[in-house]
Each structure stands twice: as C-alpha cells, then as structure tokens.
Image (cartoon, rainbow, N blue to C red):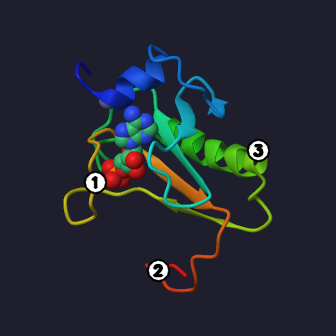
C-alpha cells in the first residue's frame, strides 16, 4: 500500500536490518523501544489490523517470527509479551498489522501491569 511506512520497511526499501524474515513476515527493532527488547513483527502484505481477514499462514509466520526473535535476542527462557494493538482504544498508531514482542524486563502479573 502506498504511503504505508510498514509496507515500505517490509519491502526492504529502507535497508532496515531484519532480525527475522520469511516469505510472509519481517521483524525489526521498534523505533521507540518500551522495553530492553522491543521488536515488531510485520507481514509483508498489507493488512490494517488482526481483524482484516489475515490468512492462517500469515498468522503462523508471525508466531514463528516471535519464537525466532525471542531465541535470537535471548529472551526465550525469561519470557516475553506479544501485543497486537487494534483500533483507537488500543492505541494503534500504525495502520498496518504488527505484533510487538517485548522482553528483557519483568512486566508483572497483571495484563497491563509493568514494574
Ligand atoms: P502501535 O501503537 O501498536 O500502532 O505501534 C506502532 C509502533 O511502531 C510504535 O511502537 C512505534 O514506535 C513504532 N514505529 C513507528 N514507526 C516506526 C519505524 N519507522 N520503525 C520502527 N518502528 C516504528
Ligand atoms: Zn502497509
């Protein structure tokens, strides 16, 4: 999609370093990290949100990317949080489906808690 920053990044046009890449998704560091490890998993094909008819194989690649990124960044054993903000109440600011992978610190037990 034109004028979509994540479409452009995923196409490789910015030369972004990918921590993971397969046929369907890429993963790269968030520009404004909110945890010691903060990586975004982004489909190469444009979807607005998780509710935009995302094929099962794309979702499978996103999960595979999360596992691979966690192992590569050393947070597989300590744990990590995966978040897909959807719509305005969730605070979605980039209208191209993405999954945050956050780790390297304890976020506490509550859904939204962060120590
Ligand atoms: P969300 O609020 O869930 O839509 O998250 C969007 C995320 O994208 C934020 O954490 C931003 O810091 C991140 N972001 C925006 N532009 C870029 C970019 N050019 N490269 C990397 N991360 C970005
Ligand atoms: Zn896009």
Callout 3: 10 Å neighbours few (<14), some, many (20+)? few
Query: To which residue does mark 1 refer?
Result: 92
Relative to 44, say whether 83 is above or below: below
How far, Cα to Cα, is label 2 from label 3?
25 Å
Spot occupied by residue 13 in the image (x, y as percentages of width and height): 44, 13
Name the quadrant containing residue 96.
top left
**Element type at marker 2?**
loop
Q: Is 40 on the left or on the right of 106, as rendered?
A: left
Q: Residue furthest bottom?
A: 109
Label pair 3/1, CB-CB below 8 angstroms? no
Q: Quadrant of ligand 1?
A: top left
Label pair 2/1, CB-CB below 8 angstroms? no
Query: To which residue does mark 3 refer?
Result: 72
Q: Residue at x 26, y 60 (%)?
A: 91
Q: Is 93 on the left or on the right of 41, as rendered?
A: left
**Element type at marker 1?**
loop
Q: Is mark 1 within 8 Å of ligand 1?
A: yes
Name the quadrant containing residue 104.
bottom right
Q: Residue furthest left?
A: 88
**Element type at marker 3?**
helix
Spot occupied by residue 24 in the image (x, y as percentages of width and height): 53, 28
Query: To which residue does mark 2 refer?
Result: 111
């Amino acid at each position: 999609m034109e004028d979509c920053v994540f479409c452009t990044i995923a196409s490789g046009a910015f030369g972004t370093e990918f921590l993971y890449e397969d046929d369907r998704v890429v993963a790269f560091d968030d520009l404004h990290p909110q945890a010691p490890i903060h990586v975004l998993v982004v489909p190469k094909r444009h979807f607005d949100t998780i509710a935009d008819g995302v094929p099962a194989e794309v979702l499978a690649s996103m999960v595979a990317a999360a596992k691979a990124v966690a192992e590569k960044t050393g947070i597989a054993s300590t744990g990590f949080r995966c978040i897909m903000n959807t719509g305005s109440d969730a605070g979605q600011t980039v209208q191209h489906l993405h999954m945050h992978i956050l780790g390297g610190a304890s976020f506490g037990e509550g859904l939204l808690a962060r120590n």
